[in-house]
Amino acid sequence: MKNNEKEVVQLNGKTFIYYSNKGLVYRHPTKILWDERNLPQNKEVIDTLVKIQQDGISLYQTEHKINPSRDYIRDLIRGNETTKKKNLINSFSEFLANKKEQVKTGGLNLSSMGDLTSLNSALLAFEDETKTKFQLSDLTEDFVSRFKEFLLSERKLSSNTTQKRINSLKVFIEYCEGKKA
């Protein structure tokens, strides 16, 4: 039994995870623009979803000797994606995509977008430095304090620039809290 070869597809400029069985198609939206699919944080999201799909297909084929249904793959990806989104970097990528749309519509200025992009780089560096994959639940006062110290001592940012990053982080935290409500 052959696995699906066309697992990542483009539709209307957006990236989808693709699965087809017996003429029934499932396209899982990634909320990633096609032109931005190779950015490191986006590539990680896509690769993770493809791996979930491939592993699910393989396990299903081993157990049932047939390919899984479209609905099985849909439920598999959606269930795993819910867990995955709790990851800080993945959630921040979603937040950035939302803010990029606001820039396009004039609801956010480019300067603010630059601050958020810089925060993204700093968060990635902080994870790398601490060798920790942070979850949303890690966003505590202690986290903010350690992150601030990292920006000042390791990244050698000025107090003003550090405060911009912290303010941007607080905007992200408020966004996450708003999504929970």
Image (tube, helix red, strand yellow):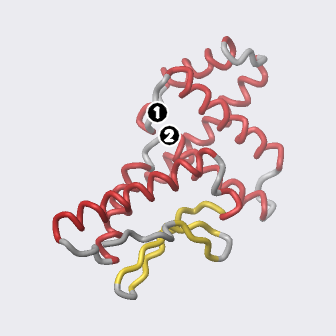
36 up-or-down from 8: above or below: above
**Position of residue 76 measured from the top left corner of the image (x, y, whole percent):** 32, 63
At horizontal 62% and vertical 17% (from top left) the residue drawn is 150
96 up-or-down from 151: above or below: below
- Direction from residue 131 to residue 11 in the image, left or right: right
Quick one: 111 or 18, which is closer to the camera?
A: 18
SS for dot 1 = loop
Mark 1 nearby-residue class (10 Å; few <14, some 14–19, many ≥20): some
**Position of residue 40 measured from the top left corner of the image (x, y, whole percent):** 62, 45
At horizontal 37% and vertical 56% (from top left) the residue drawn is 52
Mark 2 highlights which residue? 88
- Direction from residue 146 to residue 99 in the image, left or right: right
At horizontal 32% and vertical 68% (from top left) the residue drawn is 75
The reply to whether callout 2 and callout 1 are in contact (CB within 8 Å) is: yes
**Position of residue 39 measured from the top left corner of the image (x, y, whole percent):** 66, 49
170 up-or-down from 3: above or below: above
- Direction from residue 86 to residue 30 in the image, left or right: right
Question: Quarter holding the N terminus?
Answer: bottom left
- Direction from residue 106 to residue 119 in the image, left or right: left
